[in-house]
Amino acid sequence: MNIMNLLKDFIEDESGLTAVEYAIAGGLVVGGMIAAFNTLGTNATSKINCLASAVNGTSTDCGVAG
């Protein structure tokens, strides 16, 4: 086999690019999910704390965002 042919075939082969693209896309999706779950968790904790203080009679309106 000729080294030049092997090098040419290696440069023209794009099958590895697809795997890299899927890995990057998957990483972006996972990053978005982590951000969404962190926000959801923070909001849920805030509502639970508001409801707990309502049970104790020290709460304001829990329906108000803030």
Image: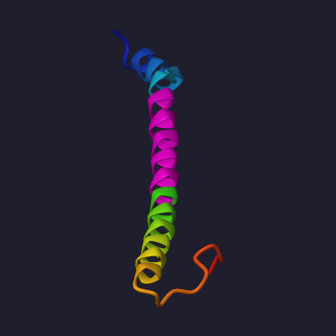
Q: Which x, y percent locates residue 43?
A: 51, 69
From which residue to which does the magenta span run? 17-35
Q: Does residue 60 lie above or below 42 as drawn?
A: below
Q: Is residue 56 magenta?
A: no
**Residue in the image at 49% along x and 71% along y:** 47
Q: Extreme right residue here?
A: 64
Q: Is residue 2 shown left or right of residue 62?
A: left
Seen at 44% across and 27% down, the residue is 16
Residue 60 found in image quarter: bottom right
| Residue 40 rendering spot, x and y as whole percentages | 50, 61
Q: In which quadrant will I find the C terminus?
A: bottom right
Image location (x, y in percent) of residue 37: 46, 57
Type of secondary structure dominating the magenta stretch: helix
Residue located 43% across and 71% down the image: 48
Point out the image quarter for the N terminus. top left
Name the spot of residue 20 as percent of width and height, x first: 46, 36
